[in-house]
Image (spheres, rainbow, N blue to C red):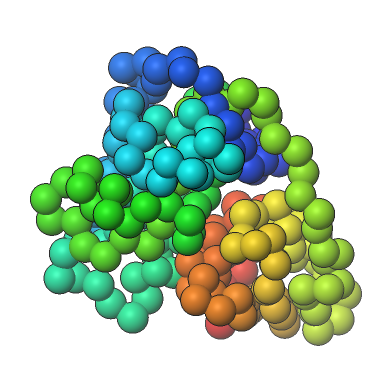
């Protein structure tokens, strides 16, 4: 499965089986996480066979069977003004890579237990922006209700295929409360993107930018 295929196949999954992640899958996930950490100065990490990410009530109602998760965090003392956007971008890469390995995921921005996650975070972990639940889903999820491309985008003139493909990819991205609060504008080969989704705006913007690049092809445009 390619990353583009993973983007189309990925849906939010909140219930998981008790099947453990094989060692080779964990190793591949860790390698992808570390590559992003090294590139962007982050401290993302993988926690396996641990249920501390959610409170007891949520485990019963919403987060059923979640025993593995990726912690989204920068290095301690190295948070910058764009850290959350970078975490959204790099987290999207890891999340879709997990899909290529046959795993399911759920991006969680606000309902996880910060205390429980922090307890299991490696030394050197800074502020935690969220977690990605990962594992073998009890089901494969289903497409979320989506806005139309014209609801979130505009292009100066006739939009080329790469721009349309990028916008379509953004509409496949997970966002807080599924608001898809993006504004994407294209002019020639220059693209701008903003996101206004309250306290989740920066993370969602990073996720959206990663999806746009994957759909449009990074070689076809530059960010404004």
| Front residue of this view, candidates 40 and 62 | 62
- Residue at (30% x, 36% y) in the render: 47
State left or right for residue 170 relative to residue 64. right
Q: Can residue 109 be seen in the rendering of this structure? A: yes
| Front residue of this view, candidates 192 and 80 | 80
Q: Quadrant of the N terminus?
A: top right
The image quarter in which residue 142 lies: top right
The image quarter in which residue 52 lies: top left
Residue sticking out furthest to the front: 57
State left or right for residue 49 relative to residue 146. left
Q: Position of residue 92 (x, y in %)?
A: 50, 51
Total label count? 0
Q: Position of residue 116 (x, y in %)?
A: 29, 48
Q: Can residue 166 be seen in the rendering of this structure? A: no
Q: Position of residue 89 (x, y in %)?
A: 46, 59
Q: Looking at the image, is 122 positioned above or below residue 109? A: above
State left or right for residue 175 relative to residue 33. right
Q: Position of residue 155 (x, y in %)?
A: 80, 79
The image quarter in which residue 180 lies: bottom right
- Residue at (83% x, 73% y) in the render: 151
Residue sticking out furthest to the left: 123
| Front residue of this view, candidates 199 and 191 | 199
- Residue at (70% x, 67% y) in the render: 179
Q: Quadrant of the C terminus?
A: bottom right
Q: Looking at the image, is 58 positioned above or below residue 169? A: above
- Residue at (50% x, 44% y) in the render: 58
């Amino acid at each position: 499965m390619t990353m583009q295929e993973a983007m189309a196949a990925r849906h939010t999954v909140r219930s998981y089986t008790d099947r453990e992640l094989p060692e080779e899958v964990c190793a591949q996930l860790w390698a992808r996480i570390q590559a992003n950490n090294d590139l962007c100065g982050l401290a993302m990490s993988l926690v396996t066979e641990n249920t501390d990410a959610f409170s007891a009530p949520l485990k019963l109602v919403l987060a059923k069977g979640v025993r593995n998760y990726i912690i989204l965090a920068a290095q301690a003392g190295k948070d910058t003004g764009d850290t959350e956007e970078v975490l959204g971008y790099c987290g999207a890469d890891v999340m879709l890579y997990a899909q290529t390995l046959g795993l399911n995921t759920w991006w969680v921005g606000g309902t996880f237990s910060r205390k429980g996650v922090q307890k299991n975070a490696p030394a050197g972990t800074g502020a935690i922006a969220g977690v990605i639940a990962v594992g073998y889903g009890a089901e494969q999820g289903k497409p979320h209700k989506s806005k139309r491309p014209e609801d979130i985008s505009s292009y100066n003139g006739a939009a080329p295929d790469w721009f349309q493909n990028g916008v379509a990819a953004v509409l496949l991205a997970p966002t807080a409360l599924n608001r898809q609060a993006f504004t994407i504008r294209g002019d020639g080969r220059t693209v701008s993107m903003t996101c206004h989704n309250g306290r989740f705006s920066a993370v969602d913007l990073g996720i959206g930018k990663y999806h746009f690049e994957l759909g449009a092809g990074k070689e076809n445009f530059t960010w404004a």
